[in-house]
Amino acid sequence: MDLYGPVKVGGDILAFCGKCKRDLAHVIVAILAGKPVKVICKTCKSEHKYRLSGDSQPKSASSGGGKRERAPRTFVKNSEYWEQKIAAKKQTPLKTYRTQELFQLGDVISHSKFGVGIVEEVKNNGKILVLFRDEERILIHGLTAPSQL
Ligand SMILES: [Zn+2]
């Protein structure tokens, strides 16, 4: 807890976000008896009860222990990979994705539908491979004629 300083309303704390399904920095919005009770996730902006990091797995529910629900692994991996990449690109200015724009390897683009992505590969047929948080997508770029999108 020392890493994040004293527990106070408006302060930062590492907590588990049920929406993002991971430990993330949260802002404390309510404290009871010196402990955070309500927090806002800095990533998805949702307000929820404070849960200690690592608290996520419910211990011994009703099922006899055979089945365990697993988070889709590829998704977790991809989003983690994406976060690392984005963190490394902090200084890179965001470019708005347009089909007419020509992008280069390593460009950080902002797509109206898919969010922020990083150009992972420039293909030679007017297409780019872009890593978004959820998955990689092939997008077109460098179109000379305006598209009808
Ligand atoms: Zn969240």
Image (cartoon, grey):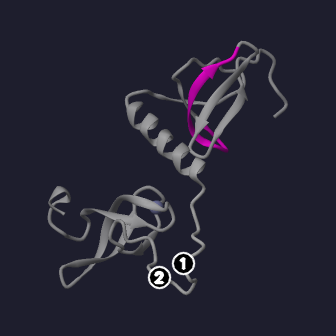
Which tag, 1 or 2, sits closer to the chain's start?
2
* Badge 1 density bin: few <14, some 14–19, many ≥20, Cα 10 Å: few
Q: Secondary structure at mark 1?
A: loop
Q: Is residue 139 above or below residue 69?
A: above
Residue at image position (34%, 62%) is 26
**Bounds of the magenta segment:** 111-123
Spot occupied by residue 58 in the image (x, y as percentages of width and height): 46, 77
Figure quadrant of the C terminus: top right
Spot occupied by residue 105 in the image (x, y as percentages of width and height): 55, 19
Question: Magenta span has 113?
Answer: yes
> Mark number for residue 60?
2
Say which of 34 and 62 sits in front: 62
Q: Is mark 2 within 8 Å of ligand 1?
A: no
Residue at image position (80%, 22%) is 146
Amino acid type assigned to the residue bearing label 2 in the image: Ser
Q: Is residue 74 above or below residue 11?
A: above
Q: Is residue 77 above or below residue 61?
A: above
Q: Is mark 1 within 8 Å of ligand 1?
A: no
> Mark number for residue 10?
none
Label 1 sits on residue: 65
Amino acid type assigned to the residue bearing label 1 in the image: Gly
Residue at image position (57%, 52%) is 73
Q: Secondary structure at mark 2?
A: loop
Q: Nearer the viewer, mark 1 or mark 2?
A: 1
The answer to whether residue 77 is left or right of residue 147 is: left
**Mark 1 vs 2: CB contact within 8 A:** yes
Magenta stretch, main secondary structure, is: strand
Say which of 29 and 145 sits in front: 29
